[in-house]
Amino acid sequence: MAIHAAVAGASGYAGGEVLRLLLGHPEIRIGALTGNSSAGRPLGEVQPHLPALAGRELVATTAEALAGHDVVFLALPHGRSAALAAKLGERTLVVDCGADFRLRDAAAWERFYGSPHAGTWPYGLPELPGAREQLRGAGRIAVPGCYPTAASLALYPAYAAGLAEPEAVIVAASGTSGAGKAAKPHLLGSEVMGSMSPYGVGGVHRHTPEMAQNLSAVAGEPVTVSFTPTLAPMPRGILATCSAKARPGVTAAGLRSAYEKAYRDEPFTVLLPEGRWPATASVYGSNTALVQVVLDEAAHRIVAVCAIDNLAKGTAGGAVQSMNIALGLPETLGLPTAGIAP
Amino acid sequence: MAIHAAVAGASGYAGGEVLRLLLGHPEIRIGALTGNSSAGRPLGEVQPHLPALAGRELVATTAEALAGHDVVFLALPHGRSAALAAKLGERTLVVDCGADFRLRDAAAWERFYGSPHAGTWPYGLPELPGAREQLRGAGRIAVPGCYPTAASLALYPAYAAGLAEPEAVIVAASGTSGAGKAAKPHLLGSEVMGSMSPYGVGGVHRHTPEMAQNLSAVAGEPVTVSFTPTLAPMPRGILATCSAKARPGVTAAGLRSAYEKAYRDEPFTVLLPEGRWPATASVYGSNTALVQVVLDEAAHRIVAVCAIDNLAKGTAGGAVQSMNIALGLPETLGLPTAGIAP
Amino acid sequence: MAIHAAVAGASGYAGGEVLRLLLGHPEIRIGALTGNSSAGRPLGEVQPHLPALAGRELVATTAEALAGHDVVFLALPHGRSAALAAKLGERTLVVDCGADFRLRDAAAWERFYGSPHAGTWPYGLPELPGAREQLRGAGRIAVPGCYPTAASLALYPAYAAGLAEPEAVIVAASGTSGAGKAAKPHLLGSEVMGSMSPYGVGGVHRHTPEMAQNLSAVAGEPVTVSFTPTLAPMPRGILATCSAKARPGVTAAGLRSAYEKAYRDEPFTVLLPEGRWPATASVYGSNTALVQVVLDEAAHRIVAVCAIDNLAKGTAGGAVQSMNIALGLPETLGLPTAGIAP
Amino acid sequence: MAIHAAVAGASGYAGGEVLRLLLGHPEIRIGALTGNSSAGRPLGEVQPHLPALAGRELVATTAEALAGHDVVFLALPHGRSAALAAKLGERTLVVDCGADFRLRDAAAWERFYGSPHAGTWPYGLPELPGAREQLRGAGRIAVPGCYPTAASLALYPAYAAGLAEPEAVIVAASGTSGAGKAAKPHLLGSEVMGSMSPYGVGGVHRHTPEMAQNLSAVAGEPVTVSFTPTLAPMPRGILATCSAKARPGVTAAGLRSAYEKAYRDEPFTVLLPEGRWPATASVYGSNTALVQVVLDEAAHRIVAVCAIDNLAKGTAGGAVQSMNIALGLPETLGLPTAGIAP
């Protein structure tokens, strides 16, 4: 029996990617599609890459429109999920691609988002220790941010194995789709093509406390994060270059071993053979995370790199993967591991 | 019972795309993978976007390696298919992504390719009138060139309906993957990013006679083609801008009607609603062709545009679609219609 | 004694490029800079690539602000130039980068722009026969559109020599800066990177009558133009692929000879050696136009290609070149011929 | 009286950029141009963006060809400069864009380059303390690497003022031209467009000891550098994101003040106003370095970012700037500060 899924925010990039993946999911039937300013228009006008849904009409984002589905994906600006979820009832699985329920620390939420903390939901990064247990049977899922997904997959094995000092430095390059579909001058193609630029420098990006939360949890002690996001001239992809001082006595072999152990059985996170480094092109459109790690002997730093597709594994893919777990479906169902390359 | 497929030339762009699509095809089991200079290496080194096949070893391209499969995809430079196919036996479906068996006119072949004509196989563009009949049950398939796929889908309805004068002008922009994976200086990222350039101008591109063949066949008279390919700063995609003088008395309504009729029941070719134009981004990684047409009243020309993914619908997708027909499978099996966007 | 120049619309792409070129012009002193919504802000905020002018304040676009300069460049939306110019007095050279005064045919203007025709000024494409004579000493200059610049340079020698039939087919790819700096969703980097798309298809683009005007003038008979612009994933550059039926008896040698004669003494238009084709990267940031032409014998069509930088030779460079002529300065003063490559 | 300059390696990217800048330099006359595999060909075939030199013939790279010029620019693979320079005599200014004479530490040279150390020449980064004194009247100049230029300009003021702990973490994104013009598969446009990837991770990139040398010199103590270069999908540009723990007691105001003091009088290095961050697009083709710095209070790290054009300020621009100083010319002569944007 098909599982009925609705997508709120179906006109945006995250919502469009959820739909693309759901179209390839054998157990899902796509129900209501909602938008804001695009309500009333056919989806084909705003998501021309989804011809199978071109004739579907976008409706306004209301609890009424979303009710009656088995799963509701929320791909909305932060601040809207709590009220909608409250009206959807416990029997509906609500998968929130937004930020509202990611943080456990209410003070951190309020400091970075400037509004009251809505709460905390099971965290949709199944690769983290203990995450799958929380996701199984869950009725609410907080999908991680795209940067925290990449940074956590790059560094958590080092922290889980007690190999890294609790000060992480993360510099990540993101494709422009991470900034969404709203037309802002600095996101024009004329501005971003051929250009790299940083933004949110100095610890002010909202994904910073989420990274610290993930790494601290596995480290068992507070980990500070210095995070610098940069905008790269590509539509998709995140390359997170992450490093931390190695604890005394850490060896290259011990480091490698920790990562091999962490990712040996993961279906979507691939530790590359030594000497090969990930490219975001390799994961274009897929739910795969490619990871590599090395010990810089001279600087005695662990340097780990993770490449993901920010919209796929970083948002919609992680959402569907978590949904699969919550619903008791095979975790990999409907999720491509193959990227579109070249 | 699974269908076993081998891919010759699995290290190249076309071969990699065949593999990506076959990985999502529910009836196919992937067998031998062959390469030339990459023989002996694991596929993961040359196709890092296909983690599911990363450990598979590439073997040398020989008839022995390819034997014993139900389907063999040839993604090789032209000139090699005839000898291989001869050794593969009639019970193996051979799908040639190369040029050897596309042309019916031996003289045209020899003029453009400078070597003896190998013959003509059923032509893998199912959307053309009569093509599906030839493909059903076929044991050999000549996959069309990427440019002829786009140009033929753009213009054939006009010629089939007798609306266009027999002189077509085709200017197409292609992503760089169309030029293959061989490292040539003019294909370096430093050279192609931020740049448009033409090549093969003046009727010398090898896809020219194939376009003329397709359009002439549906027109019932010889159609000459002026074709200019250009290299665009993107990895994938073809945008073919095609035009021809309208025959006297042609109206916008009549033109629209001919295209609606041609594409009403096609699973992969979409005539866009009036006023919307195709972008190659919308078909990234998919088997969809987006088409639009308009009558330029002042110049009395039919202007038709088609966007495809050169590696997907333009090569590997067309190959799998044709294979499905030949094997009696549902034509759309394993082929995504959704593009990866943005 | 320095020539004082003001730039209206200094916050936009065309205005910024005028400023960049004027900064390298030895005879110009840059005076007032005006903007619309950016009035009151320092130029450094909106044109961060011009550090030498970072502290200059943008003022509102009024005749008062522009008065008292020797030259005023207008880089404004169409419809505003006439009123401003009227107030600037005859001793000020007004160089209009907008469309208002390009067309001689008032009916064509009104059909394409939907507003009353303002008049016709000397046309700033010095390479056209007779243009330099009109520009010398002129007090008003209409800078051509970027597409008409490329298309006219590609085809005019063929029409001037009577070699081409009067039906031109022009397909041009433009970088996104041609669409300006206004934030529109379809111009987002996420949308345009990796994608080619057409727009204004079917004879409706406003540059169409300007091309027809230029080619008709040199042909001595009405030339119809079928023009299809496409948006290419690059910030700058136009590649115009232009063709027309060759008149009976036209030979490759005769064609070549006509182009050699036309461009032999031009400082900025380069006819490439046979066999080489222009790339837009080669003219990035320069005032150079690269041209090549060939006779397609089978289709009996003349195919000519021109690459320019749409903001440089296509707008600001053409404006400065024309200003140089009008003021009696050396035509090449301050204008780079070298592109930025790779 | 004109200064005669020869360029060895004129067919490559660095050599081409030297030529582009020299074409705009009022005191330079361009003499011999040498190449290796391209010897005997006209420059127009390999550097089509330099029409003013299109007819010049490339000759083989020999001391004889380079002799008799006032200045010789070497844009060659490392290992060749010493022998050539030895033959050129002391009256010729030799400006080496390669690595041979950058390092003072012979052991570091041999560890990273695997060949005997050739020596140390005055270092062509005039912004570093004491550098201009060494460059004035110099007969030999070692042009810095592109990454060290960006990283040193980002971090040196912090180290010079004693504000940073001696462990720097540098993650830099470079355009593909930094990898040169040799055709390698991973540098194909199809591979690099739309993709970010790291390389030389873990302290093995050859620019690492040069960064450490520069920062250690200004710090007055050994500074270790953890450096990760990444390849970005753009032809040009470097964005260096650099950080280090702040020393105890460092304040945002003190940090800002140190940078303001360092760059107040620099003609090419611009400290941006607070709150604005550099983009590589802003320095495209120019000799400008844009710098910004902030104190991450939570992580107590200094985060500094520098954007340069790797071929201009990072190579050829730095070379010409240093040449100007060595020859007693105005330091800014012939060097644009305006980038090509958008």
Image: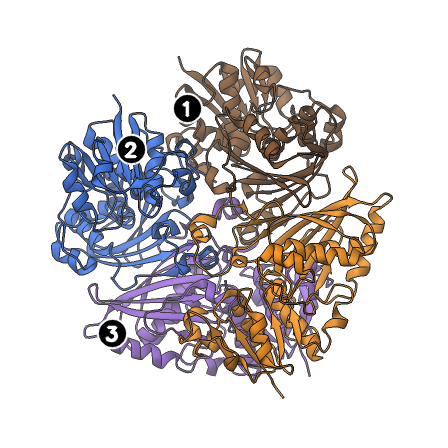
Chain colours: A brown, B blue, C purple, D orange
Q: Quadrant of residue C18?
A: bottom right
Mark 1 or 2: the one toward you: 1
Image x and y of residue D29, in percent: 57, 82
Mark 3 or 2: the one toward you: 3
The span from disc 3 to disc 2 (Cα, nearest Å) is 45 Å
Q: Quadrant of residue D40?
A: bottom left
Q: Characterize the local packing of mark 3: few (<14), some (14-19) or many (20 or more) Cα atoms within 10 angstroms.
A: some
- In the depicted structure, whether residue A246 falls above or below residue D278: above
Question: Dot 1 corresponds to which residue?
Answer: A25
Question: Dot 2 corresponds to which residue?
Answer: B267
Q: Of the residues shown, which amino acid type is indicated by label 1?
A: His
Q: Of the residues shown, which amino acid type is indicated by label 2?
A: Pro
Q: Please state, as top left, top right, bottom left or bottom right, where the C terminus of chain A lies in the image.
A: top left
Q: Characterize the local packing of mark 2: few (<14), some (14-19) or many (20 or more) Cα atoms within 10 angstroms.
A: some
B198 and D106: which is toward the camera: D106
Q: Is residue A105 left or right of residue A283?
A: right
Question: Dot 3 corresponds to which residue?
Answer: C252
**SS at mark 2 in the image:** loop
